Amino acid sequence: MASVDVVIPTWRGRDLLAGCLEHLSGQTHPDMQVIVVDNASGDGTAEMVRERFPAVRVIEMPDNVGFGRAVNAGVRAGHGEFVVLLNNDVEVEPQFVAAIVAPLADDGIAMVAGLTLIPGSGLVDAFGIEVDPTLAAYNRLRGRDPGNRPGVLAGPSGGAAAYRRSAWDEAGGLDETLFAYGEDLDLALRMRAAGWRVADAPEARGVHLGGASVGVGSPWQRRLGGFARGYLLRRYGVLRGRQAVRALIFEALVVGWGLVRHRTLVPLTARVAGWRAGAGERRSVPADAIDRSIGWRESFDRLRRP
């Protein structure tokens, strides 16, 4: 049985983390280590974990270093053959870890997407990531029944994902330029470009309480999301390709909505900052990672969905 490190980054989410760890304590997988990386929460998170969950390893960061850096630190601290990433606001079912690492028995698969549900609804929160031709990312199967047919899987969402450690190390882990958002998609594209494959695990389920760290629709979330979008647009050369016009119209709509609805230019300034940070070696987009069935109308409809 392969050894597994479950890495959970957290920031100011002590009570949510406690619920997450409670559900992890009943996992059926026999060889797993849980590693919590606390981004200087200042709310007693580390103390709570050590008192209530003494088997869990705690890494305390000196300040809030973001999702990517925290996860990378947690992965480096482990030694498992497989790595599972989990948000601190996800409460998983007992078979989650065993189910999400099962596809990694295939030596050609490097990453696996778990399935998270919207609380109290039975509908899907995310079943990995799918991207349209402009590289805009969406939660796969969002708002639909888990039994529905999903779209093309680009890669797992970092909130419920499994990775082969050797492939993770080969790729260099998450890009720490991205504080939060987009780093899971970027890693998936880099792994796929290196020849690795992705799978999903519909039996690896958990309930995602959602948006607990930065706040859904908050200015900080818009800033982080905008930065990631600008970074990926440049790093993957989207505006140099055939989808440039579509991408520019899409971005103009997002920026315009922010100005009209929220009276802020944060979506624009964040994208500009991300674009500047994205200068450097261009990365390739594997053709089979794109869901080309997502047309203009579908992209706009998804943009409006919560």
Image (cartoon, rainbow, N blue to C red):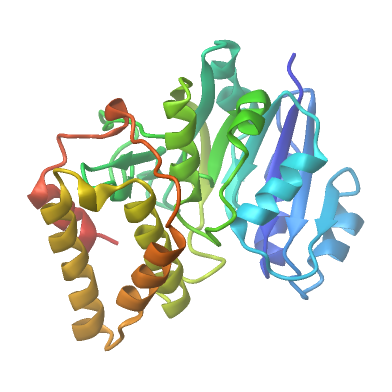
Where residue 66 sits, quadrant-wise, is bottom right
Q: Residue at x 41, y 66 (%)?
A: 276
For the question of whether residue 201 can be seen, the reply is no
The N terminus - image quarter = top right
Could you tell whether 244 is left or right of 66 in the image? left
Q: Position of residue 225 (x, y in %)?
A: 41, 64
**172 or 107, nearer to the observer:** 172
- Determine the residue located farthest toward the bottom in the rendered image: 263
Could you tell whether 251 is left or right of 117 in the image? left
**74 or 202, nearer to the observer:** 74
Is residue 99 shown above or below 264?
above
Q: Position of residue 80 (x, y in %)?
A: 77, 28
Q: Position of residue 184 (x, y in %)?
A: 49, 45
Q: Residue at x 73, y 17 (%)?
A: 2
**291 or 35, nearer to the observer:** 291
Where residue 33 sits, quadrant-wise, is top right
Q: Residue at x 62, y 29 (%)?
A: 170
- Determine the residue located farthest toward the front in the rendered image: 280
Could you tell whether 216 is left or right of 162 in the image? left
Q: Residue at x 48, y 59 (%)?
A: 210
Q: How many marks?
A: 0
For the question of whether residue 77 can be seen, the reply is yes
**25 or 289, nearer to the observer:** 289
Q: Position of residue 227 (x, y in %)?
A: 42, 66
Where residue 34 sits, quadrant-wise, is top right
The C terminus - image quarter = bottom left
